[in-house]
Image (cartoon, rainbow, N blue to C red):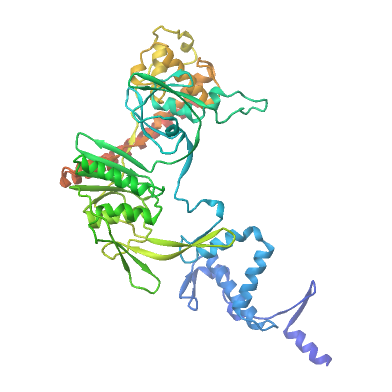
Amino acid sequence: MIKKLTAIILSVCILLTCGICAFATNIDEVEDISEDQAGSVIGSDLYGTIFQSRSDYLYMLFEKIVDVYVKNHLYEFTKEEAMDKFVYDMIADHPELYEMMINTFLGTMDDYSSYHESSSGFLSVRSPRAGYGIIVKDTGDAVVISSVIKGSAAADAGVKVGDRIVKVMGYDVSRVPWTVISLMLNKPYIYISEKTSTGGYADYNPLTEIVVDRGGELVTFNLQKDVVDNEMLSYEYFEDSGIAYIGISSFLGDTLDTDFAKLLNDIADKGIKKLIIDLRDNGGGSLDLVLNMAENFVEKDGVLCYFRTKNSKPSAVISENGKIEFDSISVLINENTASAAELMASILRNKAGAVLIGKPSYGKALGQSVYNLVTGDYITITTYEVLDANGESYNEEGLIPDLAIDNVEMLYEFPALEIFNHVNYKGIEEGVYSEACLALEKRLNIMGYLRDSSVDGIWDDDTHLAVYVFQMAHFSEGNGQLDDSTVTLITNVINGYKDYTYYEDSQLDVAKLYHSSFSQAKRLVAEKERLANKQKELIEANRAKVLAELDEEN
């Protein structure tokens, strides 16, 4: 007996650690693959996968360990039983990882299946935000209300389209740009609410007085911010070219489809036959909404698209409404045009003869079904694919524009400015012209705090308000008077404009021209490409110049 035991000890090492008895023996499947070799290992037993990373190696090693564990364990159980017990124990020991584990699992075969808590609002057809419910247009002479959102504080109070904003919180804003009014309305509490002993404000959502000019009559409203739906539709008419423009920011909203149909019919009733639909940066939304909206462009009984589900042939989605006729339609798309927005663009292209302009879209044609859980939470699982009206998929590839063009990045042409510094600002006097005040006003104009017409070199109410709002925006306090800290900040902000770039809407320019001539639109694309290359060189040269100037200053 002793001799036999000794022989066993020579071939198998018995380890006693914390009451666990383990036999260390050779495992051929594991020992012949080192981590250093992982980059060249081919796992032919795992779908022919080539392991080229540490993660690949660790995954394969885990698989082998599980196989050896199931095969050699004292107790009889299957690999599925072991994995079930493993998952249960992980959840029991680490409940904080539950959501991560569920989402990791649901995302195994696609990027869109996921788990959502009931409070997430993921399936909401609304896109709420805090605001007064007004959309404005700066005409250059005045700030005019162009839209009032239904159900908002402004709508309930009686604010109307066409009202011109002339006063905010007692300040005359009739001659300042929208930038100033927007900053004031964004945080009204810093203008009219008292600070508490802790440094906060007594009322973060005060009643805000807004006075509008309505046909020569001044009307006063006291509004408070509330939750309002984002305006999904925007409309503009380009009178010089007879083109109607509709922007759709998202396919959300309880009445979006009916609002869209009404807008289209209004456009058609006016005899407008050219239409631009802007779907750039539209991430999608409700499938029902987009199909209802797309029906306006497809003849009755026409095919909108196809749905392909598991183990079934693609089924057609048929239009039930009549078609609104337009002579020409262009659709703006970019890399952020996704999901429902891509479906809309594909239907417009295939069924209404629309031309797509911009950059290739995102490429999501997979749809998800919702499964509610007893907890009130829910999961979404990819259950179908959308095919276009020709039965073709654009998933992962995206829609390729007929006129491919990116918006051109432009270098801001920094103007020559008079001297404005910590010495000459002290000579500025109210109602008196001075070179220093002119230099200040030009800077305020560049930053968007003064209109062109107010840049006259005379310190007046407009200049005072511009400085005051600038101070409140950056310091959360101010008095509208110049001091060293304000002058320093104005100088620093203006210096940033020396390297400032912006994007011109080249895509919209091409879309407008397309409705007159496709060939001219193509030529414009080429011109914009040349402009983009030229601007790129200017931007790089200017950046080097600015950096060199900074080095000299330092």
Residue 9 in the image: state x and y as whole percent: 77, 84
Q: Nearer the viewer, residue 374 or 306?
A: 374
Vertically, is 105 above or below 208? below
Residue 530 in the image: state x and y as whole percent: 25, 41
Residue at the image point whose x is 28% and y is 56% from the top: 347
Q: Quadrant of residue 385?
A: bottom left
Residue at the image point whose x is 51% and y is 31% from the top: 224
Q: Is residue 443 visible?
A: no
Q: Nearer the viewer, residue 296 or 480?
A: 296
Vertically, is 10 above or below 186? below
Q: Quadrant of residue 353?
A: bottom left
Q: Is residue 40 visible?
A: yes
Residue 411 in the image: state x and y as whole percent: 34, 33
Q: Quadrant of residue 216?
A: top left
Residue at the image point whose x is 46% and y is 26% from the top: 493
Vertically, is 215 above or below 33? above
Residue 280 in the image: state x and y as whole percent: 34, 46
Vertically, is 222 above or below 329? above
From the viewer's perspective, tell me whether residue 352 is left or right of residue 465.
left
From the viewer's perspective, tell me whether residue 76 is left or right of residue 8.
left
- The number of discs equals 0
Q: Quadrant of the N terminus?
A: bottom right
Q: Nearer the viewer, residue 311 or 421?
A: 311
From the viewer's perspective, tell me whether residue 362 is left or right of residue 102.
left
Q: Nearer the viewer, residue 433 or 26?
A: 433
